[in-house]
Image: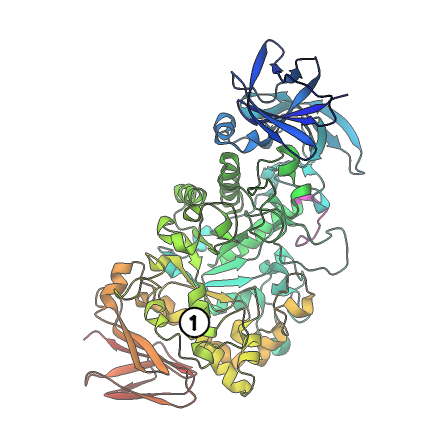
Amino acid sequence: MNWFEAYLDEMDIVTILFSKETPSLNNHEFYLHDGVQRHSLTVIKKEELVTETKFTCKSPVDIEIGKFNLVSDLFGNQTELLIGSVIRTKKFDQLYYYSGNDLGANYSLTETTFKVWAPSAEDASLLFYNKRGTIYQMFSLAREEKGVWSITLHGNYDGYFYRYNVCVNKVWREAVDPYAKAVSVNGEYGVVVDLSKTTVPKYSQYLPPFKSPTDAIIYETHIRDFSIHPESGVKNKGKYVAFCEEGTKGPYECKTCLDYLVDLGITHVELLPFNDFEGIDESSNQDQYNWGYNPVHYNVPEGSYATDPYDPYVRIRETKEMIEALHQKGIRVIMDVVYNHVYMREYSSFRKIVPGYYFRFNEFGLPSDGTGVGNDIASERLMVKKFIIDSVQYWIKEYNVDGFRFDLMGILDIETMNAVRQKIDEIDPSIIMLGEGWNLDTPLPEEEKAIIKNAEKLPRIAHFNDVFRNSVKGSIFDLLEQGFISGDIRYNDNFKMLFAGSITITKEMDGLFQSPQQSVNYVECHDNHTLWDKLEISNADESLEIRRKRQYLAIAIVLLSQGIPFLHSGMEFFRTKYGESNSYNKPDNINQLDWARKNMYENYIPLFQALIAIRKAHPAFRLSTSEEIQRHYKWLAPSPNLIGFLLHDLDEIDTWENIIVLFNNGVLPKEYLLDDCDQWIIAVSGDKADLNGIEQITKKVMIEPLSTMILFKTKI
């Protein structure tokens, strides 16, 4: 009978837990046996716990991990030394960091090499499964340097289903390869694939030049939402390849899906997560829904969006076809990525292969939960950072994606995020990075978190601007609270900064960011109530038409402010989720893009398109540096209900020499007196818009209630 257990908590620190049922011993001496030598362990601390006595012992030598070690006492009792919290020490991280780029299954026609990083493992093997879920071959893996286990098998292993079986602390656990490039239906097995079979024509040559993140106009959608509506006109509803279908028509022949995106003029489509996630049974024909924030396999496309989830090749090929169909239309693709947590820590391959390493733990030794889903990824650890960088790099090189939106980016650390940015820049500096820089309760020092407060430490990484969002429409947590567009003027001073890309404009008000390239300006996204649903509560006593004008006022503020405009799909036709604030698993009738509703509000969309066209045509609305904005921007606040800005002396930047933009949130028209007697041209007034001008005016102009006005002067 073993009276005690021993754990390695640092490379030279052993913790021994002695049961209090052990006969009383006056002399406590412990020894380490590494198979060659016996070393005396020095007791440096003794603690009395409830049922055990805890001894903290120091070894005269660093203990080699992965090797069989025994701990014994003076009387010959012995136990195997198990891996403890050493797994989370910096010394372990440095000793076992593996820099190779060959983890996973590396396929060729004549051989496949399998490599898995499992430094705490005592043993590991490779299992091949048939499609009935039965093991039919097993191979022992050889331990190599840095804790990598490997085997090279000669022959053609294309299509083989595999798992790793890893023994840590005398417990065997099967796991899917974290670096798997393909999986079986529902991700039960990794699959060896020949990626050359998934090659599709690339159409990057159709993409317009993209110099600065402020040139982006981002349109967020969900792959299933986009086309699942019964009247979308799409054959492959809810699938990747729905984005490949042209000529689709909705009610009364209105354009839908891909053709509609092209007509809008947006530059980037941001897609909610499409790496393999939990929450949908890929083998079921039943309609199921999930946003996709339950990541399981990070380097494999989700199977429920494929026309055949059973064929590992189909999901890969169709994801690439979707991306290239958008590229062919001049639209870039941003991938929503979820590196901050896994679906369920207990069943994660990370935990099964290297228990205790990939996740953060609090001061009580329990998994931290800043994400709210039971686990936080420990991005600060070297092999976690490497995994994130490797994964991002893989999606760029294999799938040709153009950007990444990092979910709950505040869980991740600054060093990792900057390393990701650096790697992306080595490949293609035009690839955009943005994320949620919320300050979440995870055991990482605040100064190391990738949060808005630390934006100056995160150059060329953009943040969703919640100050912008709340100032425009009111708090997302208090549906009754109003913002500027819903009639409240208490946030007006914020707009002095917000219109200017949230940089510092005056000494009295610090900006949120060092550069307009860091501000993602938005009022609505997949999260929380749609703007239309919030207005239905915050402005319930108003007519539908007044609320629609308020919504378009918000859209105009997003599209005309300095920074990166972000638009939620369908907001231009007043998207509703019928009051649902968290529709992550709600049915299609809540989440779908309603193409019948689009047809109903078709007459509003030209203004949406015109605002996009004006932003694209005039660089003055998308200045890329703080210096340019500070030189050309002037805040205007002629009355509490009328605010805006002047962009002046634009000779070297724009064909418009001076621009005035005004937003009236009042229910009455407002007069604005011009500072000069020059002739100004109206480009936008109410629901009318024309890039070449609607009419010319001098001295004064009247701004309609609940509307936007753009005035400009051309160069003489």
Q: Main secondary structure of the magenta part?
A: loop
Look at the image and tell me whether residue 107 can be seen. Answer: no
Q: Specify the quadrant of the image occupied by residue 653.
A: bottom left
Residue 678: give x, y in percent of width and height.
20, 83
Which of the pair 431/43 is nearer the observer? 43
Which of the pair 23/178 is nearer the observer? 23
> Residue beneath label 1, please?
471
Task: Give above or below for 498 relative to 282.
Answer: below
Q: At 78% from the left edge and 31% from the top edge, which residue is drawn?
A: 135
Q: At 48% from the left edge and 40% from the top edge, which residue is drawn?
A: 380
Task: Give above or below for 516 relative to 319.
Answer: below
Residue 499 horizontal side relative to residue 345, left or right: left
- Crowdedness near tag 1: few (<14), some (14–19) or many (≥20) residues, C-alpha within 10 Å: many
Residue 277: give x, y in percent of width and height.
65, 50
Q: Amino acid at mark 1?
A: Ser
Look at the image and tell me whether residue 50 can be seen. Answer: yes
Q: How many marks?
A: 1
Q: Specify the quadrant of the image occupied by residue 692.
A: bottom left
Task: Give above or below for 259 relative to 682.
Answer: above
**Magenta region: which residues?**
304-313
- Image quadrant in which the C terminus is located: bottom left
| Residue 311 within the segment the image draws in magenta | yes
Which of the pair 305/9 is nearer the observer? 9
Residue reaching furthest to the top: 36
Residue 642: give x, y in percent of width and height.
35, 82
